Structure formats: structure tokens, C-alpha cells
Amino acid sequence: MTHMIHRNLRRTPPTAVCAFGMYMRDSDGNTYLDASGGAAVSSLGHSHPDVLAAMGAQMKTTAYAHSGFFTTDVAEELAQRLAADAPGDLNNVYLVSGGSEAVESALKMARQFFVENGEPERRVFIARRQSYHGNTLGALALGGNEARRRQFEPLLMDVARVSPCYEYRHRPAGQDINDYTAGLIAELEQTILETGPASIIGFCAEPVVGATLGAVPATPGYFKGVRALCDKYGILFIADEVMCGMGRTGTLYAIEQDGVVPDLVALGKGLAAGYQPIGAVLARDHVVERLRNGSGIFQHGHTYNAHPVAAAAALAVQKVIRRDCLLGAATVRGTTLRRMLRDAFGTHPHMGDIRGRGLLVGLELVQDRDTMRPFDPDLKLFAAVKEKAMDCGLMVYPMGGTADGRRGDHILLAPPFIATEAD
Ligand code: PLP
């Protein structure tokens, strides 16, 4: 007997046989409303004709070109477009095959920047607890998702940790929101000083925390404070927009809403909306100029860098988002969705919080609404919720809480931007 290895080694998931618009169908004839866009990926829904046509046309001309030998018009056009729409001088684009690769590439570019800047002693990253930055070893080390890290801990580089910006659970009752934010910035500065500013490469965070906290945006001024500290100590700020980027929160880049420009941005998921595996790193001029004027080489690379069919899919997705005004749709539909959820569940005894930005929406489930007491993590509520929802023909993306109660159970909703109110 041969077996395909699935995430759950004891259970084979349903077989998807067709997908169209907001819906997916399995081989038993069950239909599912894709309310999570897979894992916040499918921003255009399934089988979008423009994207399929663009991929088909690219396949007929150049289906593959190794980036060590060639570039392609489609990859160049995608890079130009992403940079042109990005804030500030994030003018440089490196194309990879997914979110974890994007984060790995950003980490290595940041390290190489300092090596070529004559500061090889910089070797530490700072990241937040209850964060997720991917599953490859560098990205896993960076992330603060304890459950995912635990057994791989001996293989992971040391990362300095600070608290996430998680108002619902971490802001003490009665504390002013500005004081809460100032406290987080003070904690980051303290960590920088204790770690030794001259040994730090960068600080990495998700502008809106996706999988690990459930659609949690930063409080006003938080990222301005982060940017100011990074500037003060000469540290690079890396924004992980793998989940929250590419229009998911109503602007192409989520960090636009915080009014700061990171030094590096990692993209994935919504970049090609699931039609092809692709990710990207955007870098500011000063980062790339240092490498260009130094060794002239970025010491990194993958076989599928700047894959032309993936680039064609991503470029088509970007064009559809612009042509069909889908950033506005994500904002409006997200507001409507949160209102409808509040109307339906706002006073439910187990509904702690309904939050998010654009069409990245989180529902935090609690045992007790007044005390915010989370459920016992041993209950594995998130697994039960996912299964029950699938039984009802609904795809949602739940995540479990932690035993210390610093993170609760939540359900992430990330429907395609084409969703109607009726959906
Ligand atoms: N960064 C964030 C914020 C993510 O949400 C994810 C995936 O969920 C990743 C990185 C890793 O992306 P991928 O699964 O495409 O490797």
C-alpha cells in the first residue's frame, strides 16, 4: 500500500473535484462555501476566467525559465506593478514560491545588508509572541507560535521576543489605549537595549496578525512607534504581509493604514490568490543599493524564483483587483460582515470579540464573555469547529488557544473579495 502524506496522517480529507467562485465541491457531491479563502488565499474566488486565461497564454510561450539564465517580461511587469503600488521607496521586488520562502529571503537579505555594511556582528532578530511567519526553519524560529515550534526548538535560531499588540486580551481593563501602546513600545526598546542594539538585524511583525491571534490589527500609533525605534537604533523593520497583504485588509499593503514604510515586506497567499504558488519580498532602495554597490549578488536563490506562469497568475490577479475595484469591495464587505456577525452573535455568551480589518475577520470564542476566560485548550475546540462547519458546508479557519490563556480560541474568516452580501 502506498500513501500520500496528509497533514492528518490518520484521516484523508475530502477530495476536491471542482471549485467555482465562492464554492468548492467534493467527490461525494458536497458543496462548501469558501468563507476562509482556504487559508486567506483565494481573494478572487475560484476559476476566475482572467487568471486562467493569463496562465494559459503564458504556458504557451514560456512555461519555465530559470532565473539564473533569463528574466521574463511577465515577471518584470509584475515586479514593476508591485513596487509602483507599494508605499515609499519599496522599489525592489524579489519573486519566490510562497510565504515561508518570502520570509526566509527577507531574513537573509537583511543579514546580508549588514554584512555588506561592515556590521557582521548583527545577528539577532526580534519578533513577537503569538506570531506566525512560516514553517521553514528560519521562519519558524522567527514565529512565536509555541505549538508549531515545540518539537523543532533545538533546530531553531535564537530570537528575542516581545509582546504582540493584542488589545482584547492584553490591555488591562481601564488602561488608556495610548498608554497600552506606549507600554508595548517601551517594552520593545527595553528588549533592544538588553539584546544590544549593535547585535540586532531586524524587527519582524504582521501588520494585522492572522492565523495565530485571529485578525488583530495594531492599536493606533503602534507601528509609528516601531518605525521610530528601528530608525533610532539602525534596525530593519520587516513587515510580514503574507496573510494580510494584497488587498485583504482593504488596501493593497496592510501597513499603508498604519502610515509607515517598512524596510522589507514579505508577500504570499493573496499575491496570486491561490492560482499559483508565489511569494515576494519588497525591499527599500537603501537595502538593495548596499548589496548592489557591495558584492553585487544576493546570496540566495531557489529553482522556481520568478516562475513565469506564477508571475502571470499574480499579474492577472493584480489587474482584476484594480479593474473591479476590489480593494473598496474588501473594505465595504468586511464592515458589512462584521456588522452581520455582531447582529447574529454579538451577545452570544461564548462570543468574546468580533474584529478585523477589511475581509480579514476574527471571532474570539470564550468560556465566559464577562471574564474573557478562554476554553480549556485540551478541548480542541478549534478542530471541532472546523469539522462541524465542514459538515454544514462551510469553510472557516479556526485556531486553538494556549494553556496560559494568553491567547484564546478564534475563528478566522477571509472570504474572497468577490463575496456578495447574500454569500
Ligand atoms: N507569514 C504569515 C503571516 C502567514 O500567515 C503564513 C502562512 O499562513 C506564512 C508566513 C507562511 O506562508 P506559506 O504557508 O505560504 O509558506
Image (cartoon, rainbow, N blue to C red):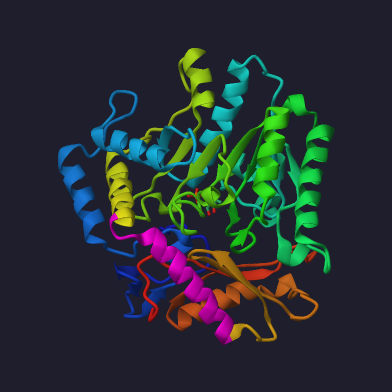
Q: Is residue 176 above or below residue 98?
A: below
Q: Is residue 56 above or below residue 405?
A: above
Residue nearest the observer in this picture, 97 or 346:
346
**Is 330 in the magenta?**
yes
Q: Please state the horizontal and vertical placement of residue 208, each as a whole percent of the image.
A: 59, 55
Residue shown at 42% from the left, 54% from the top? 270
385 on left or right of 56: right
Residue shown at 46% from the left, 18% from the top? 297
Q: Please state the horizontal and vertical placement of residue 194, each as a whole percent of the image.
A: 84, 34
**Is 36 in the magenta?**
no
Displayed quadrant of residue 369 = bottom right
Q: Is residue 226 above or below residue 43?
A: above
Characterize the magenta stretch by its predominant secondary structure: helix
Report the span colored magenta. 323-344
Q: Please state the horizontal and vertical placement of residue 44, each as a whole percent of the image.
A: 34, 61
Residue shown at 48% from the left, 75% from the top? 336
94 on left or right of 244: left
Is residue 125 visible in the rendered structure shown here? no
Image quadrant containing the C terminus:
bottom left
72 on left or right of 415: left
Residue nearest the observer in this picture, 192 or 262:
262
How many marks the image carries: the answer is 0
324 on left or right of 421: left
Q: Please state the horizontal and vertical placement of residue 307, each as a whole percent of the image.
A: 32, 38
Image quadrant containing the N terminus:
bottom left
